[in-house]
Image: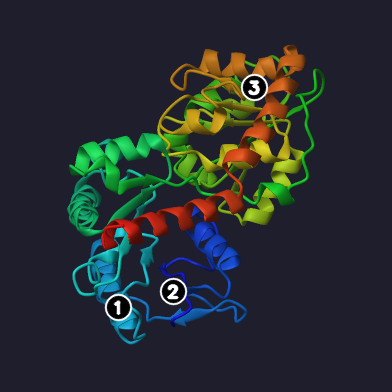
Amino acid sequence: MNNLDFIFCTNFYDDVSNGPAKFARLVAKHGRGRVLVITENKQESEIDVQAMPRPPVWAKTTFLAQLSRSATFAQVIAGLSLPKDTPLVFNNVINTLGSSRRFPNPVIGFINDYKNMPAGRAGFRGVRLIQRILLSRLERTAALRVDALVVNSHFLAEMVTKEYGLLPARVHVLYKGSNVLSVTFTPRTAPALGALRLLFVKTDFKIGGLPELMAAVKLLDRPIELHVIGPTENAVAAEVDVSAIRDTGATVIFHGKQSPDFVADQLRGADVYCLPSHSEALGVSNIEAMSHGVPVVTSGMGGIPEVTNQGANCWQIDQNDPKSIAEGIRATWQQWEETLDKVNRAREWVETHFSEAAAYQRLEEIVDTTKKSISGE
């Protein structure tokens, strides 16, 4: 274990449908031979991995599962006989609770979103709200104990610093990398005639602004084919009158939860990507759309402006106003020259700021800075 740059601990790995899991695979890919990944659901053999047990059956809630994981990670780490200067990097800061005071090693934890903080709990009620409050307390305790905290946007850095009372110098921004350089860039503007193929990707569709998008579809005087990835039709129909949208002549297709390959295939065929989100720590799906050359219509909420270069690389809309959303969508074909400029600038922006290589290099910088800070260099 003496030649390792750091240990990376994550319960997610094989399930690549979320940001933390995608980042875990990025770390394994770029740190091969220099990073050991500790995870509970790793099955491939070409990556250096230390397996760990899943939470026991009694840990049925997220709260109990996280407590169980933090103890299990510490147990596995204790058996590795690591040099005391080998950093321990955790994809979820709550999982550091069993290790941050037990080992002399530098401990670095991630907070990937703000769903446990007050701003992210607005949609929760009853038992789910209580669970989020308990998780928030665990997250704050863990964040105060680690040597460094990593977040995925400047927006989130400001939020966690304020909410959890952290020292700004201990909070580091690391943009989650996208495999942008392997994506074929096909710059496009929306066609002026025929059916317009819209794409929306967000499991939490209400936060993502799908109800407002569907209201905007009714205002577009042309055939629309709306593809929705993430939620099921039944889940959306409980909140939105989907039949009323279809009565306007629009086609609405629900794909449910899908793999990254399926999403990429849909992006290759999309005319416009629209995410009128009410709340995003960063907005990775916008990055993926920009990588493919799809015109993006999105809001300016949360960390999204860090992806869109303060709105310069997208058609920025008011997420609360269906008319504004419809105007942004229309602009993708009515103002096609400006749209094409935005699409080309967007690809350049994500290549520079959101590539996998840039993300891993930034992680190495944070690890090195943390080690020097602890040693007094």
120 shown above or below 192: below
Label 2 CA crowd tier, 10 Å (few <14, some 14–19, many 20+): many
Q: Could you tell me residue 161's position as x and y percent?
A: 25, 40
If you read the primary sequence from the N terminus, does the residue marked by circle 1 or circle 2 appear first?
2
Considering the image in quadrants, where does the N terminus appear? bottom left
Q: Could you tell me residue 32's position as x and y percent?
A: 58, 72
Q: Residue furthest front?
A: 377
Q: Is residue 46 visible?
A: yes
Q: Which residue is mark 1?
A: 72
Residue 56 as seen in the image, left or right of residue 295: left
| Residue shown at 78% from the left, 32% from the top | 187
Residue 365 as seen in the image, left or right of residue 45: left
Kind of residue indicated by mark 2: Thr
Kind of residue indicated by mark 3: Thr
**Disc 1 from disc 2: Cα separation:** 10 Å
Considering the image in quadrants, where does the C terminus appear? bottom left
Q: Which residue is mark 3?
A: 248
If you read the primary sequence from the N terminus, does the residue marked by circle 3 or circle 2 appear first?
2
Residue 115 as seen in the image, left or right of residue 30: left
Q: Which residue is mark 2?
A: 39
